[in-house]
Image (cartoon, rainbow, N blue to C red):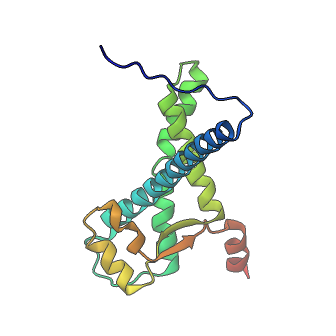
Amino acid sequence: MPKVTSKKIMHPNSRKAKRAIRDQIQKTHIAQKRKEASKDRSVKYRIIKFIHKRIANDEREVFTIEEGTELVAEFVASHDDYLLDVARRREQGKQISTTLLLQEQEWKKVKQEFLTGIESPDLTDRATVHRVKNWNKDERSLPTFKMRLYRQPDESITADLASD
C-alpha cells in the first residue's frame, strides 16, 4: 500500500507562511522582468534584421546619423499600413483579436519610442556596420552590437533652419 504524504498545514501568520509568500512573489516578479526583457530584445532583433536587409549589399563602411535615422524611420513606417488596417476594422465594427490588439499596442509603443529615442545599431561606427552586414541572425549576438539612440527629426526645426 502506497504511503500517503500530506503537506503540513501552516498558520497564515507564521514565519514559514510569510516566507513562502515572499518566495512566490519574487518568482512572479522575476518571470515578469524576463518577459519584459524578452519583448525588448525582440524589438531590437526586428530593427537589426530590418537594417541588415537594407545595408547588406551596400558598399559603404559607415553611414551618417541622418542615414541611420532614415533607416529607423523606414522601420517604424513599415507598420503604418498594419495600424491603418486595424483602425479600419475598428471603424467597421469588426471584432479585433487579442493578438492584433497586442501587436497594435507594441507598434504604437515603437512609434512613441522613435519620438523620444529608439535604440538601434550605431551605423557611424565602422565595426558595428561590419557586424550588422555579416550578422547570422542569431539573437544571442545582440549584446555585441554598439547601440545608439535615434530620434525622429523635428520637422519644424529643420524647416526653420532651411528658411534662414
Residue 24 position in % (x across, y down): 58, 40
Return the residue nearer the eye: 91 or 147: 147
Is residue 14 toward the left or the right of residue 37 in the image? right
Which part of the image, by quadrant, shows the C terminus? bottom right
The residue drawn where x is 46% and y is 55% is: 43
**Residue with the most extreme top position:** 1
Return the residue nearer the eye: 15 or 69: 15
Residue 87 position in % (x across, y down): 57, 32
Residue 33 position in % (x across, y down): 56, 51
Q: How many numbered circles does the render carry?
A: 0
Residue 135 position in % (x across, y down): 28, 69
Q: Is residue 8 above or below residue 61?
A: above
Is residue 155 toward the left or the right of residue 145 in the image? right
Q: Is residue 79 above or below residue 132?
A: above
The residue drawn where x is 46% and y is 52% is: 38
Which part of the image, by quadrant, shows the N terminus? top left
The residue drawn where x is 70% and y is 41% is: 15
Return the residue nearer the eye: 148 or 161: 148
